[in-house]
Amino acid sequence: MKRILVTGGAGYIGSHTLVELAEAGYDFVVVDNLCNSNKESLHRVAKIIGREVPFFKVDIRDKDGLSKVLDEYSCDACIHFAGLKAVGESVAKPYEYYENNIGGTLVLIDVLKQHNCKNIIFSSSATVYGNPAVIPITEECPKGKCTNPYGQTKSMLEEIFMDIQKADPQWNIVLLRYFNPIGAHKSGTIGENPNGIPNNLMPYITQVAVGKRKELGVFGNDYDTPDGTGVRDYIHVVDLAKGHVCALHVLQNGCGLSIYNLGTGRGYSVLDVINAFVKVNGVDVPYSIKPRREGDIATCYSDPTKAERELGWKAQFGIEDMCRDAWLFQKNNPEGY
Ligand code: NAD
Ligand code: UFG
């Protein structure tokens, strides 16, 4: 396997994955419509890897546009990051989420098939477990009820991929269920660059630390967790990126349909993350306790042993590395890209 089509490659996880793909000796071509990213991320990737990143500003719903890219750059596999991902926005704009994430993926699958490229890695999410039946969460844990259209698109797309692989066993499909990616490349040149007010914990913390926001709201301290705040499995984005390279190896060996959790197996509360951030970076993060956020669950962390066993992948970085690297990117790029 030589060349990989990376959809959504200008985004947060995509840009970090390009670096790891280059490191592992893969070629790639990126398509992204830049609806939630900036071409600058690809210039920064180019600096890190020492060569240009082939990029096309193409929407995955544009069949002709995608086809042209694959005519010019034949690919052996696709890593499919492109999608809308804001939970709250998906509640307000369900049609846009279904149309972009599901509609776009169906077009992509069709074009890949026409180009005889039947190998794909899909960015799924721990959100498909809903309020998980067991903790730590294994891949056998039944999928739960998603409380928002974003989560529904991930859950439905998983079903679609399963049906497609069942009907045509030539497809090799890896569904990666990410836990909570945070942090940034150690160079501090690429990182998470949300538009507007961040929805997620770490970008909110870094924006408070850099003085862009006054204080962090901690959403609830009355959960059934050790300190009452929500517990999540934060994973360094570089570890997550490396997981995709490992998944390419199993695709290459003809894996059929495989599902893996990508997490660390450790849960940290909101207060744990704030304390680690303050300790490792020596900056203040003022916060106050706010009501619970609708749709949040108390605890969510993975059992990552299947990925270790079958992919030979294990997260290497700890919470302090994640906090240090997230801060380095924010400090170096106070206004983002
Ligand atoms: P991101 O928004 O930074 O990256 C997604 C990229 O896809 C963006 O560059 C965006 O411009 C592009 N895109 C969106 N719709 C497109 C379309 N129709 N055509 C072409 N490009 C399009 O998000 P991310 O955090 O890097 O997430 C990547 C993937 O991982 C997404 O599918 C997301 O749902 C999934 N995921 C993310 C998280 C997380 O916490 N970041 C957790 C679980 C799953
Ligand atoms: N939190 C706060 N204050 C904030 C933001 C978050 O206290 O300003 C808390 C939340 O209540 C939660 C924890 O921090 O307890 C993590 O929240 P995030 O929004 O960072 O992450 P979530 O676990 O809610 O969701 C994320 C992605 C989803 C994905 C899920 C599982 O946003 O898309 O991880 O992978 F599905």
Image (cartoon, helix red, strand yellow):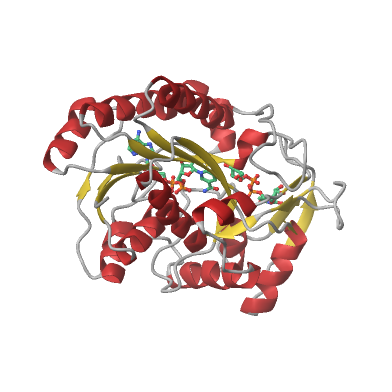
Give the farthest residue toward the front.
253
**Of 37 and 181, which appears nearest the observer?**
181
> Residue drawn at (58%, 36%), measured in percent from left and top?
87
Q: Is residue 309 above or below residue 90?
A: below
The percent position of residue 300, horizontal first and vertical second, equals 72, 46
**Of 299 and 287, which appears nearest the observer?**
299
The percent position of residue 124, horizontal first and vertical second, equals 52, 39
> In the figure, is residue 289 to the left or right of 58?
right
**Of 28 and 328, which appears nearest the observer?**
28
Q: Is residue 165 above or below residue 242?
A: above
The percent position of residue 204, horizontal first and vertical second, equals 60, 56
Q: Is residue 62 visible?
A: no
> Residue drawn at (37%, 39%), measured in percent from left and top?
120
Q: Is residue 302 visible?
A: yes
Quadrant containing ligand 1 reads top left
Residue 150 is drawn in which quadrant?
top right
Q: Is residue 257 above or below residue 195?
A: above
Residue 205 is drawn in which quadrant?
bottom right
> Residue drawn at (61%, 54%), measured in percent from left and top?
263
The percent position of residue 141, horizontal first and vertical second, equals 70, 36
Can you say which quadrant of the picture contains the C terminus? bottom left
> In the figure, is residue 160 to the left or right of 233?
left
> Residue drawn at (63%, 58%), measured in percent from left and top?
264
> In the figure, is residue 238 to the left or right of 199?
left
Residue 241 is drawn in which quadrant?
bottom left
Q: Number of marks in the image?
A: 0
**Of 207 and 164, which appears nearest the observer?**
164
